[in-house]
Image (cartoon, rainbow, N blue to C red):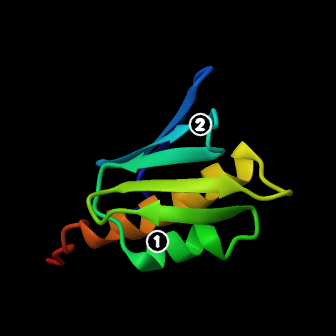
Amino acid sequence: MDAKISIIVKPFLIHISIGNEFAILDRKQSEKGLQGITFSTPISSRDADIIDKSGIAHVARFTTSGTLAFSRKAFYDNSTMTDLIIDILKRHEAKHQPAQHLG
């Protein structure tokens, strides 16, 4: 069974949640041209690669504790980034799903 996806858009952030996992996307760029994502779960280089290889953003840095900084590429939009974050969260949520017992 798929977990419910919730997306809350606010002026300065987008909050995305799936089951027990969530991420917060900062909608504004810093003075250095970076934006951030904070995940509720540890992330890996595989997660960073999903964003970096998307063609819409370049990952400047990430930490395994769940923070990621990126710069926008020419085709960046928040909707596509939200979809990428959903894919990452779904992968992590699936890791935490309890085994289903038959019987």
Left or right: residue 49 versus residue 66 is right
Q: Could you tell me if residue 96 is visible in this image?
A: yes
Expressed as whole percent of the image width and height from the top left, the position of residue 26 reads 54, 36
Q: Is residue 26 placed above or below 67 in the rendered structure?
A: above
Expressed as whole percent of the image width and height from the top left, the position of residue 77 reads 77, 47
Q: Residue at x 30, y 49 (%)?
A: 40
Q: Quadrant of residue 91?
A: bottom left
Q: Quadrant of residue 83?
A: bottom right
Density class for disc 2 (Cα within 10 Å; few <14, some 14-19, many ≥20) is few
Label 2: element kind: loop
Numbered disc in front, either 1 or 2: 2
Q: How many marks?
A: 2
In the picture, the quarter occupied by the N terminus is: bottom left
**What's the amino acid at mark 1?**
Asp
Left or right: residue 47 versus residue 64 is right
Q: Report the residue marked by disc 1.
A: 47
Density class for disc 1 (Cα within 10 Å; few <14, some 14-19, many ≥20) is many
In the picture, the quarter occupied by the C terminus is: bottom left
Q: Could you tell me if residue 18 is visible in this image?
A: no
Q: Report the residue marked by disc 2.
A: 30
Q: Which of 15 and 5 is in front in this view?
A: 15
Q: Which residue is drawn at 59% across and 36% down?
A: 30
Label 1: element kind: helix
Q: Residue at x 46, y 63 (%)?
A: 61
**What's the amino acid at mark 2?**
Ser
Q: Which residue lies furthest to the front in this view?
A: 32
Q: Is residue 102 placed above or below 87 in the rendered structure?
A: below
